[in-house]
Amino acid sequence: MVGREHDPTFDLAGRVAIVTGGAGLLGVEHAAALLSAGATVFIADVRIDVARDAASALARSHDGRAHALSLDVGDPASVRAALAAILVLSKRVDILVNNAAIDAKVAADGLRETSRLEHFPLDAWDREVRVGLTGAFLCSQTFGSHMAANGGGVILNVASDLSVIAPDQRLYRKDGVPDERQPVKPVTYPVIKTGLIGLTRYLATYWAEQGVRVNALSPGGVQVDQPAEFVDRIVTRIPMGRMANSADYRGAVVFLCSDASRYMTGQNVVIDGGRSLW
Ligand SMILES: NC(=O)c1ccc[n+]([C@@H]2O[C@H](COP(=O)([O-])OP(=O)(O)OC[C@H]3O[C@@H](n4cnc5c(N)ncnc54)[C@H](O)[C@@H]3O)[C@@H](O)[C@H]2O)c1
């Protein structure tokens, strides 16, 4: 009997990766995917306690290759300190996954619907852009420069299906609420996610000759604890008829971070059950 062959281009043994926002729902999945392919992974997050718990659980099942790192992606000094800390332990960084973001809430403040454009607070805009877009820029600047000076690497920007389509505000409608108070997906989220695609293209061409490849992954929504009414509405807009499971992106993360995608840069891989087709 012939054994299964392992494609070495997907192998990440010896590579060192950092996943920002690594303590969150998808960050842990990205980390697990990279660990399973053989990488050493730094789970970097402002929530250091959660990052530590995630890293110690993953380290047990992956030969101690998972580590936690305190990081605020919106603070340049914190980003530089994170690189320095990794270099002490691992000497190099090969993979940066820009995954940290603040999920803009579809929520009322009791008096008015602050998610709506007319009332959307500037401090919320600044806070969300700082993490989701400025944070990806700062991490790319520091880690990408390191990679460019050290023979190359990979940056993966985690965007969203809202990098290619507009939010469908009908998904969030509440019966009996006047139009001007209807909740909406805030303007920040699609702006940040679309901006990440521009950053992806810019960095991909900027560092192509230095061997730094830069791509984006645009996931569709993961089903967690959303109200049943929302899930019932959104699945009718997804050709495959379901929201994502959190593990659905693992294969794409390994592909995009490994030599399996070695001739690919500057692209946006949309994995959304077909939602953006309708
Ligand atoms: N979950 C989904 O359905 C979905 C769908 C499409 C895209 N995405 C994108 O995937 C990524 C991960 O989403 P998620 O669902 O795991 O979100 P999440 O909220 O579970 O995780 C985000 C993580 O980022 C961390 N974080 C926040 N601010 C930070 C900062 N300043 N510095 C470092 N870390 C910070 C948080 O502590 C958290 O652990 C995000 O970019 C999100 O926009 C998620």
Image: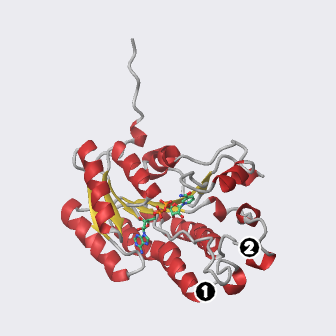
Q: CA distance from mark 1 to mark 2?
A: 16 Å
Estimate the x, y position of residue 115 in percent, counting from the top left: 65, 77
- According to the picture, the residue beneath numbered tag 2 turns out to be 182
- Reply above or below: 172 against 79: above
For numbered disc 1, what is the local secondary structure?
A: loop
Foreground of the two, 153 or 254: 254
- Most extreme residue toward the front, as rendered? 176
Classify residue 242 by image quadrant.
Answer: top right
Q: Of label 1 and label 2, which has the lower sequence position?
A: 1
User: Three-letter amino acid code at disc 2?
Assistant: Gln
Q: Residue furthest bottom?
A: 122
Relative depth, front residue between 78 and 201? 78
Mark 1, residue position = 121
Visible residue check, residue 261: no
Task: Give the quadrant of residue 155.
Answer: bottom left
Label 1 or label 2, whichever lies nearer to me, is 2
Residue 30 located left or right of residue 188:
left
Q: Is residue 120 above or below residue 277?
A: below
What amino acid is labelled 1 in the image?
A: Pro
Left or right: 19 as drawn, with respect to 265: left
Q: Secondary structure at mark 2?
A: loop
The percent coordinates of residue 243 (x first, y second) are 62, 48
* Mark 1 Cα-neighbour bin, 10 Å: few <14, some 14–19, many ≥20: few
Q: Quadrant of the N terminus?
A: top left
Q: Residue at x 59, y 68 (%)?
A: 193
Q: How is the image coloured?
A: secondary structure
Task: Check disc 2: other Cα within 10 Å, few if <14, some if 14-19, many if 20+.
Answer: many
